[in-house]
Image (cartoon, rainbow, N blue to C red):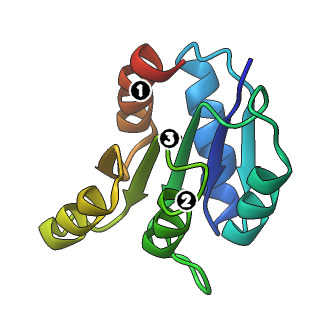
Amino acid sequence: MRPICFIDDDSDDLELFATALKESGCERPILPFLDPSKLLDFLRATTLDSEPHLIITDLNMPLLDGKNLLNEIKNSSFAHIPVIVMSTTAREKDKKDLMELGARDFITKPSSYTQLLSLFNELQEQWC
C-alpha cells in the first residue's frame, strides 16, 4: 500500500498528525519527514509502486518551506502526487498562491486534538 508522507519541522506535530490519522482509521503507512529535502531524496529513490499516495506538508519551515517544496514537486516527474499544505496561518493569499502552484488543498492546522481528529476523519475518507 502506498504511503502518506508528512513533512513538518516540528517533531511533536509529526507524531501528533500520525497518531490522529491512524486513529481516524487510515491504514496506509505514514512516513514522517522533518526535513523537506529528505522527502525529495525519498521521492527520487522511489519506484512507481512505492511512491506516496499523498503528501501533506507544513507551510512554514526553515530552508525549504512548503511553498518551495510544492513548487519542486509540481515541476518534477512527481507532479501527479497530490499535495496538501497545512499551516497555523489562514491567510487567503497563501491559499490562493498554493492552489495556483498545484496544491490539492490548503488547511489551517486545528488548535485542538479533537479538531485534528475531525479533520483527519474527513481526510481519511478521501485519501486512505
Q: Disc 1 on helix, strand or loop?
A: helix
Q: Are marks 3 and 1 in contact (CB under 8 Å)?
A: no
The amino acid at mark 1 is Leu
**Mark 1: few/some/many CA within 10 Å (<14, 14-19, 20+):** some
What separation in Å lies between label 3 and label 2 (alpha carbons)? 9 Å
**Mark 2: few/some/many CA within 10 Å (<14, 14-19, 20+):** many
**In terms of depth relative to the viewer, which is nearer, 17 or 57?**
57
| Label 3 sits on residue | 80
Give the residue at x 58% y 59%. 76
Give the residue at x 77% y 26%. 49
Please determine whether, in this image, residue 86 is positioned above or below residue 96: above
27 sits to left or right of 83: right
Residue sticking out furthest to the right: 45
What separation in Å lies between label 3 and label 1 (alpha carbons)? 18 Å
| Label 2 sits on residue | 73
Give the residue at x 39% y 44%. 112
The amino acid at mark 2 is Ile
First-in-chain label (3 vs 2): 2
Q: Disc 2 on helix, strand or loop?
A: helix
Give the residue at x 81% y 37%. 47
First-in-chain label (2 vs 1): 2
Instruction: Point out the frontmost of discs 2 and 1.
Output: 2
**Mark 3: few/some/many CA within 10 Å (<14, 14-19, 20+):** few
Image x and y of residue 40, in percent: 72, 62
Q: Quadrant of the C terminus?
A: top right
| Label 1 sits on residue | 123
